[in-house]
Every structure is written in C-alpha cells, then in structure tokens.
Amino acid sequence: MSELGPDAREILRKGRDGDHPSAADRLRIHSSLMAAIATGAAEAGATESSATMAKAADGAGLPVSVGAAKPIAGTLVGGVFAKGIFVLLVGAAGIGAMVAWPKASAIQSPALPQAVAISAAPASTAKETPPPATMTDVPREDIAESGTTPAPPVLQQKPLSVRTAPSAAPLHVNEETADSLIAETQRLRDAHGALQSGDPEKALALLSNQAAEDEGQKLREERAAARVLALCKLGRVDEANAEAAAFLAQNPRSPLAARVRKACPTNR
Amino acid sequence: MTGHSKEYLAPVASVHASPMTSVPSDGNALVCAQTLQLVPSFEVIYNEHFDLVFRNIRRLGVPEALVDDAVQEVFLVVYRRLGQFEGRSSLKTWIFSIVTRVASDHRRTIRRKSPHIRSADTAVDADDIADERAEGQHERMERLEGVRLLHRLLDELDDDKRIVLVLAELEAMTAPEIADTLGENINTIYARIRAARRDFEQAVARERARERARERGRLR
C-alpha cells in the first residue's frame, strides 16, 4: 500500500495532536445529553432527523423503527439542546410517548442499581425486542418493521471523570451543575405532563414555584414559555399576553418564540 | 425477524453495590448473555469514548457550530442502542460506525442548505475553544492552525476517502477494523486507503503551491 510522504505525515501528526476536546466541551455536552435523556428526548417524537437516527443505527447494524428514529430530531436540529427539548415538551401535541421513556426518576434515583434497571426492563419487552444484528446484515425492511423500544441503560448520577488531553490529570465535572439541570428538567417535564393531562393549574404552580427559580436558571426561558401556555389554557389571556410580550421582548430569537406567539389566539 | 431476545445478566454484585460510588471503568459493566462479553455502562462509554467521538466528528467534516449537536446525536444513538450491542465487533468499531453515519448525514444536510460552506472554514476558532491546557498563546495558535490545515485538506477529499484516511491515519485503525466499521469488503478498503493517501498527498501539494503563491505575492 502506498505510503504518505513526510510532509503529509507531519500535517496529520500536528492535526491529530491538536484537536482533542477540552474539559469544557465534555461538561457542556454531558449536561445537554443528560437533559435530553431526562426529558425523554431519546424517545419522544419529532421528525426532521429521523433519517439520521435510522441510518446511524443501520450503519451500526442495529434495528430501529421509524418511530424510534424520531426522537433526536427535535433536540438536534434546533442547535441548542435545551431549546429543542422544550419544543418537544411544550410544542409537540401528541407526543405522549415521551412519558413512557426514561423517567428522570430512574436517572435521579441513586439507590437504583443499574443491574436491576437494565435486567428488569427487557423482561417486559423480551418478546418484542428485535434481535440484535451484526454490523452489516440488517435489511432496511427489517429496520422499518422493528417497532419496539429497547430498555435504556441507566445513566448513573455519579461524578463524571473528565480528562483533558493530552494531560492525564483528571478533573471532575461540577456535580451540582448537573444536579440542578436534572432538577430543572424534571420540573419542566412535570409541568409538561400536567399540561398534557389537562391540569394547567398544576403546571402553573410548578412553573411559578420559587423552588423553580432556586433550582437553576438554565431553563428559565423554557419555564417562561411554558407559563404562557399554562396561562392560556387557564383562560387568563391578559396575563398570558403580558408574559408572552415580555418573553418575546427578552428572547426575540428564541426557538420558542413562534410557539409563544401562537399560545393564545390573540397572541399574534 | 426472528424473535430471539437478548438479556443482560447481573454483573458482579460488588460492582453495583453502590452505583453512586466511583467504580473502575472496567468494572462498571454488564455481561451480554449471548456473547458473555462485558458491555460497559453508558456512562463509562461516554467517559471513555467522548474524546474519540468529538475529535472525529470534526475530522469527518461537521462544522464547529454543529459539533455539539452531532456528538450528542451519536451518544443518544449509543444510549438507545446499547442494549442491542452484540459484542461481535469492538465497542470502538460500533461507535465509529455511528459517528461516520451521523457525520455523513450532517455533511449532506449542510451541502443541501449551504452548498458553498466548507467545514474547515469554521472548524477552528481560537476564541471559541476554551482549553484548560497549560500552553502559551503562540503554542495554542500553532496547534489550532495545525488542526485548521488538516481539516482544510480533509475537506478536499471525497467523503469515502476522507473517512478511511481519518480511520487509518488518525485513529490507527487496521483495514479489517475499517471494513467492519463501514460494512465494506476489505479489498475495497485497501484500495480506498491507497486512493485516499494519493488524494491527500495531492491536496498537500496544492496547499504548498498556494502557500508559495501567497509568499510570492507578499514579496512583490
């Protein structure tokens, strides 16, 4: 096989040595990932990048249903994960499926042994679980037929060990940050559940609670948008309009802006 | 489809006696009942493969602005599909196959929406990269320039060659591993690596010619 010349090799070496992620990269993406999983983004529906999921799983030799391929889309396309999550939480009517997928409680429960969580879940779906495939032998029709959901492994809430390359000195991600993000997403998820189940009053209470503010500010924008929806559903249109106006003034480019504008019939 | 299912046997009890405690990365694992191989937990996989996923998403042409999304997408696929990982190939190979697919999809999307965008144009921005490494500004800029140049040259390859060059030359994967990752015949992979090296050499030669032209322009 032909070999590369010294110049090309040097370019490859320099590039290879220089493109490692930082600890900040690792923390940032881990936080978003945890939020996505906690809020069911790994399973909830959306449409745009379903092909990505199907192809990725296909390439990995894994069966995947079209429905299962949807979840990532809403969270990925928007760019900012939390924004996408909220679009899923608030905007997508008919996404009841997300309730069935990884509960934040499972992630948050420190007492839940992983072995129990993983071995127990397939027991209920053993007959439906599609057989594992090799890397290359999954026909497309099989992928399309597969309509079941594998049990998710449990994401443990332990301190994340962080490496900075090339240094091997370990750092530790701020566990408090991850905890507060989980708490915020759990609250938002609960509020969404209340809205979905026709209890906007409960949703509003969850979103208005001082505890919501105390838990963290990462999803404040999402909470504010959800409040508008809850107020609309309660028929408190004037308050909804006022909060919608404030939201749009503060977040004119928010991906939630369109949803907020349409929350109440008069919010145009 | 056939109906056989896979179960995970209970791992060594002591390993999971206290999931909140930090456990060795090789201990936090499950045993696949089919292959009797250890399958690490998702968090262990994230910790051990994050660097690999992150750097290769960029190498495979996803612009800097979309790297976070693409990396998250890879790990969400891993998260969802880990229960079906058979262990017939290595975990690294399996994850790579996801990385290549996700990156390919992102590239396609970018080309469709912005056909003139090239990933290397935004691949490295010194101001955007927070780095705790102890290095001076000069060293940092030099490192980033090295990355930028590499990404620019990789951009000149077509997708198939780019992938095999990254896997072979930057990740030191063997041809059989690459064939496994991409689901291709090994002879195809050998031929593609050869072609990728040739094209990369040509890209380097063009780059050097451009540099000389710029240098001449400055001297005039």
Image: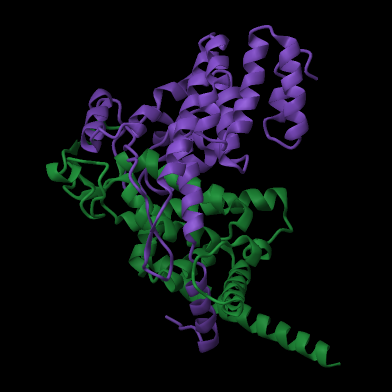
- Is residue B124 toward the left or the right of residue A242 in the image? left
Image coords of residue B156 (percent x, y): 63, 69
View extreme (bottom): residue? B219
The answer to which image quadrant residue B41 occupies is top left
**Residue located 43% across and 42% down the image:** A176
Please identify the quadrant where the C terminus of chain B is shown. bottom right
Q: Nearer the viewer, residue A45 or B115?
A: A45
Number of marks: 0
Which one is nearer the viewer's eye here, A175 or A15?
Answer: A175
Query: Percent from the top left, x then y, of residue A133?
Result: 31, 43
Toward the left, the furthest residue is B13
Vertical position of residue A79 compared to residue B156: above or below: above
* Image quadrant assignment for residue B186: bottom left
Q: Quadrant of residue A81?
A: top right
Above or below A9: residue A153: above
Residue B180 locus on image (x, y percent): 35, 58
Residue displayed at 55% across by 33% down:
A85
Q: Where is B118 relative to B80, above or below? A: below
Is residue A55 visible in the rendered image? The answer is no
Q: In which quarter of the image is the N terminus of chain B?
A: top left
Q: Which chain is green?
A: B
In the image: residue B9, left or right of residue B152: left
Q: Chain A is drawn in which colour?
A: purple
